[in-house]
Image (cartoon, coloured by chain):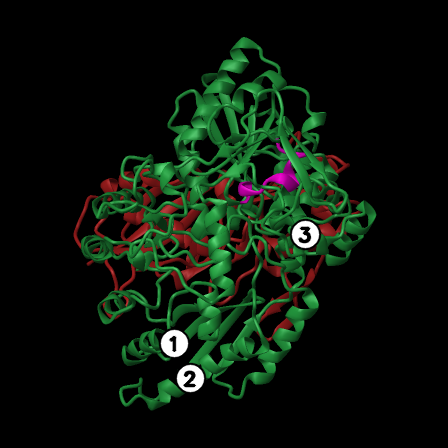
Amino acid sequence: MLQPKLERILARVQKPGRYTGGELNSVMKRKEDVSLRFAFCFPDTYEVGMSHLGMKILYSLLNEQPDIWCERVFAPWIDFEAEMRKENLPLYALESLDPVGEFDIVGFTLQYELSFTNVLNMLDLAGIPLKSADRSKLAPLIVAGGPCACNPEPLADFVDLFMLGDGEEVILELCRLYQQAKVQGWSKQEFLEKACHIPGVYVPSLYDVSYQEDGTIQAVTPLQGAPATVTKRIIKDMDSVYYPDKFVVPYIETVHDRAILEVMRGCIRGCRFCQAGFLYRPLREKSPHTLCRQGKDLCESSGYEEISLSSLSTSDYSGIEPMLTEMMAYTEQNHINMALPSLRIDNFNEELMEKIKAVRKSGLTFAPEAGTQRMRDVINKNITEDEVMKSCRIAFEGGYAAVKLYFMLGLPTETMEDVAGIIELAQRVVDLFYSLPDKPKGKGVTVTISVATFVPKPFTPFQWEPQDTMETIHLKQHHLAETIRTKKINCNWHEGKTSVLEGVFARGDRRLGAVMEAAFRKGCRFDSWSETFQYDKWMEAFEECGVDPAFYANRRRSYEEILPWDHLDYGISKAFLIRENEKARAAKTTPNCRQQCSGCGANKLKGGPCFDD
Amino acid sequence: MINIRVLFEKKGRAKYIGHLDVSRLMQRALKRAGLPIWYTEGYNPHMYVAFALPLPLGYESECEFMDTRLTEQMPFETVKDALNAVLPEGILVTQIAEPVYKPSDIQWAEYVLSLYPEGGTPQSFLEDWRRFLAKSSIEVVKKTKKGPKTIDIRPDIHPLAEQAGSECLQVRLRLPAGLSKNISPNLVLDSFFSSIKGEPPFARVTRIRLLCDGEKEFA
């Protein structure tokens, strides 16, 4: 039963099902039976967080341990937050409904920069002091992981330690050390000085950062014997790594509510704008057989009616055909849909389309990313216009009359011709449709183009590049709109203000901690939600802290500059990133990892070549 | 193909599951239970399940039902046990039955309202409640498909019992329910709360019975 106070609050808020817990497959234990309580926090709403695979994996993995109880915590929406503050209800975990402040470890997953203020807000709602330095006791220990941990410096003031790379092994090693610390009564400092020797664990307070007069970093100095560089962890064998056979099944509708199969980690492509393509190297696949077993287990324990395949580029999975054949034998018999996102244009063929068509009749989505061949070569997208046209032709001849194309605006070296090229490409897709004798009868074509704003990210060849200013992005968006000549093309983009902030935090340093705290105190949170994003408050916070956002977003760095994340090692060598940056400037492409190894360095994490042959 | 009616309770945390979400939850439970559920034929086969009389979010119920179809005969107790083994906290199947009445035959629903006073006492609340019911007409604005409409709900409120306990006032009511006429307890509660002074009390509502014409039990 829920506490009466909570029940009364729930009667006054939208979607109370976000806050009640009790879902199927959620794990209940008795707190007396465990020696470590872990609050796994997703700094966004329930609906977003419950769709996230990493949280499901680590939640189940921790709860497999009889002496650990992991519970889920999400960011309350603003209506519930207002009630919590009014009624003095502290942030609680969804399983026990106990306050987060009572847990041993409070862990955040950092999926995007614009969720950082939610981390602060959740700590504050839990009654936990924001700054690491203001928390002298071991508990609660505030930890974080996820892709944004690759440059955690903006959060260095608040988070006690970060875990870099794949979490399955390091999170358990950390919990075991914590249990030892608890038994032996270590201080927080003692614990952190030992934890920094677990591979993949980065303790920011054990590194001193000094700055030069021009504001760039002078040196990052490890203290108390902390390692000079921290290397991310990887799981080498995807077939033997833990994977849940149960997902918590939400009651309310979430963004993705279905069985998810992780086909592989990493990507062979090396698209130069894509941080995930570098962060998750090297490529590691699961066998078709493992995937089919895991899919069946998940469907049987959840009753899900849909399985989705998750990876950075599903059609690059070497076992796709045997896997789909085996899987579809099961799914068709049991009335389960298969969803296949992340297909590439260059290996899209009739056979694959027939498999997709069997389950999905809506439109198809492709991602050329840029409108001209020169621009696609700069970003190493490695697809030609002929391939885009061929894929669209296959789709049209297969009965589809709607395609969606993804593009980016603000890429390095981009000119107004490249911007107009986006619309020109879409126009040629429209023309193609009407030129086909086998086009779907009685239908008009719709080409939807969705244009995102490019943000340079750490550990990519573009990590030194200036981001377009908001003014430039607005000019380019205006040029896009002017170039459209037909109603068959729908063009979507969003305003550039959030991209500015995303860019600042992606490549930011520790001096942004003060800005983040100031913005949070002014009421900034849910920055990725248009209804709650407060650009003006953010700009006030920058002003008050004497920090210039342009220094982080719009400045070109030299190759020699010490970058805030240089002491973190994701396997990718700086020499490789410099080579790739030079090739980008010369509009030269790099073959994918299966065609030829380009020596990025990530195979050292595996201890051997990425591919056998 | 065998038509069955699944009667179930929705209590505790499950009261925060909305009507459409209950439908999805039940379909997944039927799948997990491995029951031989009949799927519609055609291009996009789906499980046949039907619900009626959506329960407002936040209400508990002892008399929810879902109609579905099996492809083969099975003992009803087996169906019930298989479902209860896979249903989440708060949802409990009480009975599997052969449908006798159609959902459109439902005429009345009975509810227990538990009203927790903010200030005041359950006893003083009881007096307020009696004064409220003593009115000859209770006009409320009801949202309809054709826009808001003012109606008198007093003739439709059939009080069955009332009791002032130590913490709350409990009243039992019968209200019209079904396709032709439906009065939600929310309408009654809102007009009652606006007739009294002070903060509106916290209210728990449980639907306890569905009745057809002539007071015959629906289930």
Q: Residues within 10 Å of mark 2 (few under 14, many from 20)?
A: few
The local secondary structure at tag 3 comes to helix
Discs 3/2, front? 3
A207, above or below A449, in the image: above
Direction from residue A391 to residue A180 in the image, left or right: right
Residue sitting at 19 percent across and 57 percent down? Answer: A325
Q: Residues within 10 Å of mark 1 (few under 14, many from 20)?
A: some
Distance between the Cα atoms at labels 3 and 1?
35 Å
Q: Residues within 10 Å of mark 3 (few under 14, many from 20)?
A: many
The reply to whether discs 2 and 1 touch (Cβ–Cβ < 8 Å) is yes
Q: Which residue is mark 2?
A: A428
Where does residue A536 sit, x and y in percent of width and height?
A: 77, 57
Distance between the Cα atoms at labels 3 and 2?
38 Å
Tell me which numbered mark, 3 or 2, is placed earlier along the sequence: 2
Where does residue B184 sit, x and y in percent of width and height?
A: 57, 57
Residue sitting at 28 percent across and 67 percent down? Answer: B44
Q: Which residue is mark 1?
A: A385
The local secondary structure at tag 1 comes to helix
Magenta residues, start to end: A148-159
Tell me which numbered mark, 2 or 1, is placed earlier along the sequence: 1
- Amino acid type, label 3: Tyr
